[in-house]
Image (cartoon, helix red, strand yellow):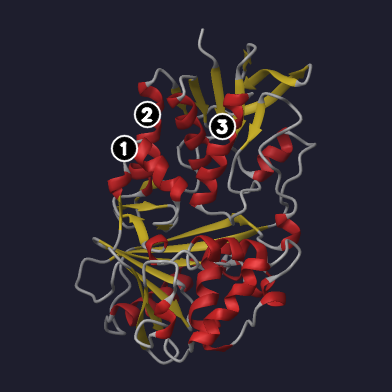
Amino acid sequence: MARIAHIIGAGVSGLSAGVRLAEAGLMVHVHEATQHLGGRCRSYFDGATGLVIDNGNHLVLSGNRHVLAYARRIGSEAGLRGPDKAEFPFVDLADDSRWLLRINDGRIPWWIFDSTRRVPGTTARDYLKLAALLRAGPDRTIGDTIPCDGVLYRRLVEPLLLAALNIAPPQGSAALAGSIVRETLAVGGAACRPLIARDGLSSVLIEPAAAFIRARGGSVTIGRELRRLRMEEGRVAALTIGDEEIALQPGDVVVMAVPARSAAMLLPDISAPTRFCAIVNAHFRYEGSHRAPPITGIVGGLIDWLFAFERRLSVTISGADHLVERPREDLARAIWAEVCKVAGLAADTALPPWQIVRERRATFEATPGQDAMRPGPVTAWKNLFLAGDWTATGLPATIEGSVRSGDRAADLALRA
């Protein structure tokens, strides 16, 4: 009889663990408490805009090796599309200046010595100061480690680290910021190309994974809430899912890939982050002409990034706790005014059909204190492992961290 793996949670972390275990020959059953797959990384039809939109505008980089390996495994890598080179258009709304950041391939960053490639108003010496992040200890904040002022900080470091950590960079963990720099800018442009699931996150990262597991005899089901774990002799002996108790046999494993708060309720003895930060995404149905590239970084305004899709302009605002109580229509109008500036639309362009998605607990608070509370994948029970972007992945709460956590939990389960 094949070993059975029960995956609790059908977000990217749980699905990546399930795919890896199914590929290794285990019978995988994924149990999702909600009525949809994908967690924060999903697509759905939105009645307000009449379009399929993503819950959030997630960006993958070409150096995210775990995400790309996962996509190759489930046959959807072609769905992550982007430019051939690491190029990032930026707009400064304070003076409407525009520039194109162009990072060369290779580890030697000669692009910082070329004024046509780097951020306007900066010098090569400014960039070298970022090396301090690579040496930062776990108790250091970014504000303790590098200067959080000046042109380079405002026009590149702040938007980059705000997007990655989802917190005002001065208060963020310097060690986590160092991990981002180490895996992107320090490697060169080959690792920094932006990749977007232009046909939707679900069609690229979620549905193919569920199909992969089902094709190998497993199951992926929704509305299946884990209510209790019964422990015996240092292992999980049974799961109560809904009203059903499922007994586990020797050799069966469990990967718990649920949000931090849910994990802490089910397993009171584990450590987990207790503070979280919000993200606001806005989606506008727009079918007219505009001059916005597929992705634009914005400084000096309310919005952080603008994504241009067919028939849709979408915005992401990170570190958005200050916006979660703002009236929705007031927020939509303020965002649309900035979208018009970035996309070259007339200031009086009418507000099109729109949707605001506010994720109040989008990511754990990426401070040194909260980072220290993230648990590893191993628990006190020999057949139970943790996954999730809130666990100790060495990265902030990103898709790469999610997949990495699922891969690691699966590898440990295979050796259990």
Front tag of 3 and 2: 3
Q: Determine which quarter of the picture holds residue 356.
A: bottom left
Return the disc, 2 or 1, that comes first in the chain's sequence. 1
Kindly report the distance in space between the C-alpha atoms of the residues bearing marks 3 and 1: 21 Å
Q: Which residue is mark 1?
A: 75
Can residue 242 be seen here? The reply is: no
Q: Which residue is mark 2?
A: 212
Q: How many marks?
A: 3
Secondary structure under badge 2? helix
| Three-letter amino acid code at the position of disc 3 | Asp
Provide residue 98's location: percent of width, then percent of height.
35, 85
Q: Determine which quarter of the picture holds residue 169.
A: bottom right
Write the residue at 38% across / 74% down: 336
Kindly report the distance in space between the C-alpha atoms of the residues bearing marks 3 and 2: 18 Å
Q: Are marks 2 and 1 in contact (CB under 8 Å)?
A: yes
| Three-letter amino acid code at the position of disc 2 | Phe
